[in-house]
Image (cartoon, rainbow, N blue to C red):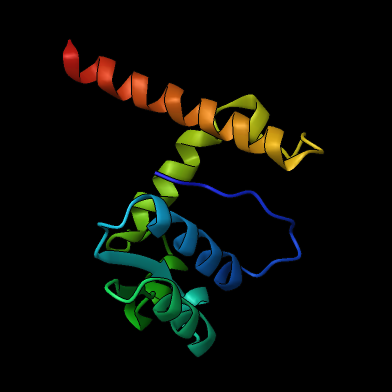
Amino acid sequence: MHALVDSAGIQDRDGGVWVMATLFGLYPFPLKLYADGGNQGPRFQAGLRRACRQVDVEIVKRSDQASAVTAKGFTVLPKRWIVERTFAWLNRCRRLAKDWECNSRKALAFFHWASVRLRIRKLCQTVK
């Protein structure tokens, strides 16, 4: 739906508020947000309330049982696998696998191309 490219010096929780504020200017309808443990602080919550009041935020955390099991193998966490899977699909594109771009506008353009490629491939699989 939406993406922003920023410098590596911006924390995820600060960038997350920035993304959500610009996202809700474009698409005011999302009601639920899933975030990882890095976004659970009061600063993120306060910034998100200022940007979009109607969103219900659910922090997806690893349970103690899941962290004990991960030492032995892989554990799928509810809802978090959606984001991780999408990142894995997008990183199949050569230009997104490494940070090649010096200009953030170019990086965002290649991200959009990779997203279009991903959507087309998913649509073509369902049409067959």
Numbered label tally: 0
Image quadrant in which you'd find residue 53: bottom left
Q: Which of 67 and 71 is in front in this view?
A: 67
Image quadrant in which you'd find residue 35: bottom left
Q: Where is residue 34 in the image (x, y as percent from the top left)?
A: 34, 65
Q: Split into 4 quadrants, where in the image is the N terminus? A: top left
Please tell me which residue is depicted at 62% across the width and 38% down the height of the picture.
Answer: 108
Please tell me which residue is depicted at 31% across the width and 74% down the height of the picture.
Answer: 58
Q: Position of residue 15 (x, y in %)?
A: 59, 65
Q: Nearer the viewer, residue 2 or 76?
A: 2
Residue most toward the right?
102
Q: Where is residue 115 in the image (x, y as percent from the top left)?
A: 46, 31
Please tell me which residue is depicted at 45% across the width and 46% down the height of the picture.
Answer: 2
Q: Nearer the viewer, residue 21 or 1?
A: 21
The relative height of residue 80 versus residue 103 in the rendered view (above or below) is below
Image quadrant in which you'd find residue 68: bottom left
Q: Which of 80 and 45 is in front in this view?
A: 45
Please tell me which residue is depicted at 49% across the width and 79% down the height of the picture.
Answer: 47
Q: Where is residue 114 in the image (x, y as percent from the top left)?
A: 51, 28
Residue most toward the front?
25
Residue most toward the bottom?
42
Q: Split into 4 quadrants, where in the image is the C terminus? A: top left
